[in-house]
Image: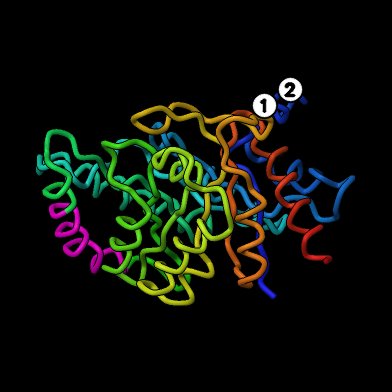
Amino acid sequence: MGKLLFGPAGNSESFFQQGHKSTLEAPNWLKKQGQDKFSGGLDLFEYSFGQGYRMNFDMAQKIGQEFKNHGIELSIHAPYFINFANPDPVMYEKSLGYIRTGIKFMQAMQVNRFTFHAGSCGKETRQNAIALMTDRFKEFMPLFEQELGEGMFLNPETMGKQMQIGTWKEIVDLCTISPKLMPTFDFGHINALTQGSLKSKDDYKRIFDYCFEKLGEERTRNAHIHFSKIQYGDKGEIRHLTFDDTVYGPEFEPLCDFLIENKMNCHIICESNGTMAEDSVLMKETYLKKCKF
């Protein structure tokens, strides 16, 4: 049987409302979440460098060690400024720099997964933008492969807006370039981009079947997942919601059923709007209940 791990992307509003201020306090807090429903608390945490690397390596090491001491797996998210489809060579070098620095933070924080947004089309046609991005990944991944230790992966993420590169097929195809690339399937983004297509277990099966075919067992069974409900319009994602939403979805149960039946070992990071830990607890509770039957 596989094992799913659950946790939030960043600290919930309740974390701060309860008087906590530092992510150093998060591991102990996370182990107490859901304790009225199951033992052991939450298993994961994703630290975002979305607005840039505003942390020194000494603090990064302290945070990484604190999470390790509590048995919580830590992943990181790259700055949002990366765009490997930008034809400007100066901007390309900046994107490479964000990845290089991120790998150093992976090492300092004892992290194995580094999620990033691969890029957007800009003024280019989608075909040309993807072709440029593919060529660049083929160019730089052999260099990064040498820096990534055993079990360490770079995780391009599926995206939720039409102008962004990151349909689930585009991301899986990108990951065929290197064994050190593993998808981050953001199912809220996928659902938003496809106008609410994720409704049944088979909808998820189609995505994972393609991943099994293209990337094989290890990277598919251990895929990184972002999950939240997301409001969308004609052009895709508008904003993240909480699990209280009854309009937009997607719902977690069909995904959970597929993951259990196929003995998956995925990491599931919740990106709900302000209730990331609470909704992670709801997902873990659902998972554990289903495992008993």
The answer to whether one can see residue 275 in this image is yes
Residue at point 70%, 48% (across, down): 283
- Total label count? 2
Instruction: Work out whether residue 111 or residue 166 is closer to the camera in this orientation and state it.
Output: 166
Q: Mark 2 points at which residue?
A: 17
Q: Residue at x 38, y 50 (%)?
A: 102
| Position of 166 relative to 174 (above/below) | above
Q: How crowded is mark 2: few (under 14 residues within 10 Å), some or many (20 or more)?
A: few
Q: Which of 18 and 65 is in front in this view?
A: 18
Work out which quarter of the rendered image holds the N terminus and state it: bottom right
What SS does tag 1 mark?
helix
Return the x and y of residue 87 as percentages of the image width and height. 10, 42
Residue segment shown in magenta? 131-146
| Residue 40 x/y as whole percent | 81, 55
Magenta-colored stretch includes residue 257: no
The amino acid on which the numbered mark 1 sits, given as a three-letter code, is Glu
Whether the magenta-drawn stretch holds residue 136 is answered as: yes
- Locate residue 234: give its quadrant: top left
* Residue beneath disc 1: 13
